[in-house]
Each structure stands twice: as C-alpha cells, then as structure tokens.
Image: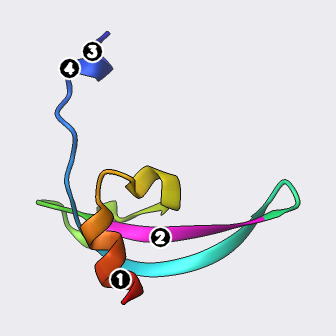
Amino acid sequence: DDFEKLPETEIECIVAERWRKINKHRVQQFKVRWKGFDPSHDEWLGKQALRNAPDILTAWIN
C-alpha cells in the first residue's frame, strides 16, 4: 500500500490547544505546524498522535 511508503512528516511545533467534546468525553487536541509547510497545513491532533514528538509536547506544556 502506497501510504506505508510515505515518509513520516515531522512536527515543527504546537501553535494552539483546545478541548473538544467527542462522544460525551472531553478530548485535548493540539494544533501542530508541520516542518517545511506553511500555516495553511496546520492540523488538530490528539495527544496520542503526538507520542512520537514528546519533546515538542513537553515544550508546549512547560
């Protein structure tokens, strides 16, 4: 499958955070900026999606 061959895009930084209500649960999401892309490509991701970028998440929280 072609999707598996694509390189993983690196997160440059977190630019915002929010809480969303999804299926009666409050979920924390972070708006990330992708390295090499402009702000039009920023995307909201859940904390679990940032597991490969712990330093970026820690820097945002602190």
Q: Which residues are magenta?
A: 26-32
**What secondary structure is marked by label 3?**
helix
The amino acid type found where label 3 is placed reads Asp
Q: Residues within 10 Å of mark 4 (few under 14, many from 20)?
A: few
Determine which residue is flagged by label 2: 30
**Numbered badge on residue 5:** 4
- Quick one: quadrant of the C terminus? bottom left
Determine which residue is flagged by label 1: 60
Q: Earlier in the sequence, mark 2 or mark 1?
A: 2
Determine which residue is flagged by label 3: 2
Q: Residues within 10 Å of mark 3 (few under 14, many from 20)?
A: few
Depth check, front residue: 47 or 7: 47
**Distance in Å between CA atoms under marks 3 and 1:** 33 Å
Q: Earlier in the sequence, mark 2 or mark 4?
A: 4
Measured from the top left, where is residue 59 in percent x and y? 29, 82
By secondary structure, the bulk of the magenta-drawn segment is best described as strand
Instruction: Indicate yes or no whether the magenta region holds residue 30.
Output: yes
**What secondary structure is marked by label 2?**
strand
Instruction: Indicate yes or no whether the magenta region holds residue 19.
Output: no
Q: Earlier in the sequence, mark 4 or mark 1?
A: 4
Q: Residues within 10 Å of mark 1 (few under 14, many from 20)?
A: some
**What secondary structure is marked by label 1?**
helix
